[in-house]
Image (tube, helix red, strand yellow):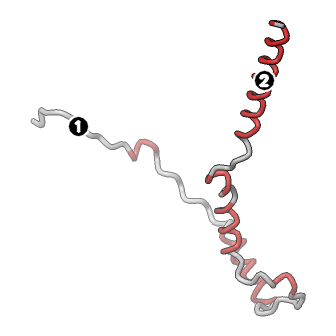
Amino acid sequence: MKKRYMVLVGLAAMFLIVAGCGSLGTQLTRLEMDYGTSYNLAKFNQIVNPEAEKNLKPVTGLDGVAAQKVVQRYQKDFEKAAPEAASPMSSILNINVGGGGQ
């Protein structure tokens, strides 16, 4: 009888432990509900025309000659020599803390 009682108590305890652990993961916190919200808001706010993918007309407004000059000017910017970096010793700042300013 005592062995049967211990088995029932053990099974009941295991059932309560499993049931208690199972209910912890069902409720989402406020933070978990908002995962990805800021990303989606930023993405949607950057879309000017959501229907733009349906417009299959070619883009107009910049002719070939003007576009070629823009590309050439862009490439010339990389041909210039990069400015020389300042010496690391030129940015030393001396700060005296304490007394004795004589």
On the picture, is 56 further left or further right than 46? right
* Quadrant for the N terminus in the image: top right
Residue closest to the far right? 56
Q: Residue at x 83, y 14 (%)?
A: 7
- 18 up-or-down from 38: above or below: above
The image shows residue 79, relative to residue 94, as above or below, that is below
Task: State which quadrant residue 50 falls in.
Answer: bottom right
Amino acid carrying label 2: it is Ala
Q: Quadrant of the C terminus?
A: top left
**Vertical position of residue 73 compared to residue 9: above or below:** below
For label 2, the SS is helix
Instruction: Tell me residue 18's x, y (percent).
Output: 78, 30
From this view, report whether residue 4 is shown above or below residue 97.
above
Residue sitting at x 40%, y 46%: 90
Q: Is residue 36 left or right of residue 14?
A: left
Identify residue type, mark 1: Asn
- Under circle 1, the secondary element is loop
- Residue nearest the viewer, comparing 82 with 24: 24
Mark 2, residue position: 12
Q: Which residue is mark 1?
A: 96
- Residue at position x 80%, y 6% from top? 2
Which quarter of the figure has residue 92? top left
